Amino acid sequence: MSGEAVPKPRFFMVKVTAGQERNVARMLESRATSPKEGIYSILVLPGIKGYVFVEAESKERVSLLTQGIRHVKARAIMPVKKEELMAHLLEKPVIEVLSVGDFVEIISGPLQGISGKVIRVDKPKNEVTIEPADAAFPLPISVPADQVRVVKQRGV
């Protein structure tokens, strides 16, 4: 063991052509052959277009890794706080994103395949009440929130 301090890995944001995030990440992965090079992970976040995140010892390591790769924009590589990335990594429960007026589809259980409009969201019970779209008359159905998938959000 030598007395020199090992730099603590940090995350860096690399600007890339929108839609090419996965391709760039694959090229970066093929270049980063071992952790000894100071590159620890490569992230592509589905909610953030046009950026690839690289966990590395230093900005210089990321710069060397991205040099000459197609679709990498020639802009400064910016450090990013780990906490900022974690907010995008944690998936929110369905009940948190549902609201009255959303159009949903039941994806499991005996009513699978039925779609309709949300008319009530009961967070304490983790339950949503929907009105099926293809019903001849209004027939509210209550199902657990984890059995539905949002098809179209209200106002979107």
Image: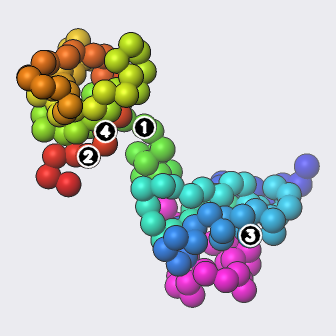
Q: Where is residue 78 in the image (x, y as percent from the top left)?
A: 51, 72
**For the residue labelled by badge 1, is the local secondary structure a helix, a strand or a loop?**
loop
How far apart, in angstroms, are the residues tagged by discs 2 and 1? 18 Å
The quarter of the picture where the C terminus appears is bottom left
User: Which one is in front, 138 or 29?
Assistant: 138
Q: Is residue 110 left or right of residue 52?
A: left
**Which residue lies most toward the right here?**
1
Q: Which of marks 4 and 3 is in front?
A: 4
**For the residue labelled by badge 2, is the local secondary structure a helix, a strand or a loop?**
strand
Q: Crowdedness of circle 3 by 10 Å Cα count: few (<14), some, many (20+)?
A: some
How far apart, in angstroms, are the residues tagged by discs 2 and 3? 35 Å
Q: Which of marks 1 and 4 is in front?
A: 4
**For the residue labelled by badge 4, is the local secondary structure a helix, a strand or a loop?**
strand
Name the residue beneath numbered marker 2: 152
Q: Position of residue 83 (x, y in %)?
A: 44, 48
Magenta-span inclusion, residue 100:
no
Q: Crowdedness of circle 4 by 10 Å Cα count: few (<14), some, many (20+)?
A: some
| 78 up-or-down from 75: above or below | above
Identify the residue at horizontal 91%, vertical 49% (top origin).
1
Label pair 1/4, CB-CB below 8 angstroms: no
Q: Position of residue 129 (x, y in %)?
A: 18, 21
Label pair 2/4, CB-CB below 8 angstroms: yes
Name the residue beneath numbered marker 3: 27
Q: Which of marks 3 and 1 is nearer the N terminus?
A: 3
Q: Give the range drawn in magenta.
A: 59-81
